[in-house]
Amino acid sequence: MNREKNQRRQQLRIIISEAIMVVAVILTVIILAFMVSGYWVNSDFEVERQGMLQISSIPTGASLSIDGDSSWLQKTNTSKVLTSGEHTLSLTKDGYDSWSKTINISEGLLYKIHYPRLFLKERTREKVFNANGTTLATVSPDRTTLLLVNETTTWNILDLSEENLTPKKINISKYFADPSLDDEEDASVFAGDILDVNWDKSGSHILFKVDIGDTIEWVLVDINDVKNSINLNKEFGAEFEDIKILDNSSNNLLAVQKGNLHKIDTSGKVVSMVLVENVINFDHFENEVVFSASDESKDYYVGLLKLGDNEVTKLDTTEEPAKVVISKFYENKYITTLEKDLLTLYNKDDFEKVSEFKLNFDPERIKVGHNGEFVIANLGVEIASLDMEANSVHEWEVEGESFGWIDNDMVYSVMDGELSVYDFDGLNHRIIGKNVSSRFPVMITDDKWLYYFSDNMIIREWLIKH
């Protein structure tokens, strides 16, 4: 009898233990689910919903201060749970300047900041190449290749990832308009006025828009094997209003000819049938093209073209011709339109309006920034930056006559020889250089070298301690 009682007691203990374990697992899962959703218990034992900050920096390992609070364990390249609302972040590192920004954390959401760059205060200035005679310089999207154009048809290419800059020469005389001969220099003279320059993402081809007398020429230069370069006007016997590179290596282009949008296969030397008529401007992402055009009634509209099946969808009408761009941020695609001073963001899939911003000026250009993280609209040095992470617009103005991109996320300008840098939203303005030429680009390579032009010389400075 005692044996049976002991067995029942043992079974009861097992059942109770297993029930407790099941309840504990369920509670743990529930707690973790709430934590992942941003819920937390504060110091007053009150449940509140929080968000998460993920922040990195260049260089890595900068000290992070949040709302004036910092500790030796609090570094960049980490994640941090924060209460929803406004927070001020500051980054510091020994030997470098500082960075700061005020952000707004949303409940249950992740806020990513990856672009803060700290500049080494004491940098060595090194002359690395004599660029005398250079009339135009352009750098590849990855900022490792620099093309130096001069008044002849023999140009220099520099590999900026190498410590010793040795020029590779290319002769482009066969691909632009017939050059004249300069008897004194005994070299062909480049007679064109370069209006625009665009690289493909691989950095192997450069598309030039050149004014040659009364003619606009489009020339695709293969910098790895120049004999594969193409004068698009001569090759296809046509004049083009606009051309954009469609893929990473310039095998396909999109071109507007007499208002009609075509696809060009550069390897097969084939021009497609008309894809869209009366196109005013366009942009593309992968196999999708967003465009502004006019219909048979001369009304303006925004449309979407899916290459491959050549399906055209009319998205919306506009009172004026809209400037349009298409981009991808996280896993979603977006279309941004600019109609005069009205900047509007839409989801691409259903063209549902996400946000709308009335600007204080009418931009003339609009472009997508690095990895779709922001959209920039500008009129000269007036800039409006649409921050996709924060879903907000910053309007600001650079100091100088023009601006460029020193890296993927940072704008630079030069005024009176002083080199200024800004985050894409205009914040963290710093002057980091003197005696810098405003005629040529400034660039950062491999996150360790700063290159710029000064007195016809290319200057290099180390940006990290070494």
Image (spheres, rainbow, N blue to C red):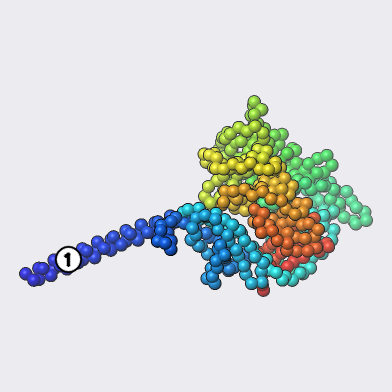
Residue depicted at x 93% and y 54%: 183
Q: Residues within 10 Å of mark 1 (few under 14, many from 20)?
A: few
For the view shown, which residue lies furthest in the top direction? 297
Q: Residue 329 location, x and y as percent?
A: 56, 50
230 vs 113, left or right, is right
Q: Residue 439 location, x and y as percent?
A: 80, 55
Dividing the picture into quadrants, the one containing residue 275 is top right
Figure disc tally: 1
Is residue 349 visible from the viewing direction of this image? yes
Q: Residue 97 location, x and y as percent?
A: 67, 67
Residue depicted at x 28% and y 61%: 22
Q: In which quarter of the image is the C terminus?
A: bottom right
Kindly state the secondary structure of the residue where label 1 is placed. Answer: helix
Residue depicted at x 63% and y 38%: 291
Q: Residue 17 location, x and y as percent?
A: 24, 65
Residue 225 or 329: which is nearer the viewer? 329
Per the image, the residue denoted by label 1 is 11
For the view shown, which residue lies furthest in the front direction? 44
Is residue 406 visible from the viewing direction of this image? no
Picture layout, residue 202 above or below residue 213 = below
For the view shown, which residue lies furthest in the right direction? 184
Picture layout, residue 7 above or below residue 285 = below
For the view shown, which residue lies furthest in the bottom direction? 466
Residue 192 or 78: which is nearer the viewer? 78
Q: Quadrant of the N terminus?
A: bottom left
Residue 51 or 172: which is nearer the viewer? 51
332 vs 138, left or right, is left
Residue depicted at x 77% and y 69%: 126
Q: What residue type is labelled 1?
A: Gln
Dividing the picture into quadrants, the one containing residue 141 is bottom right
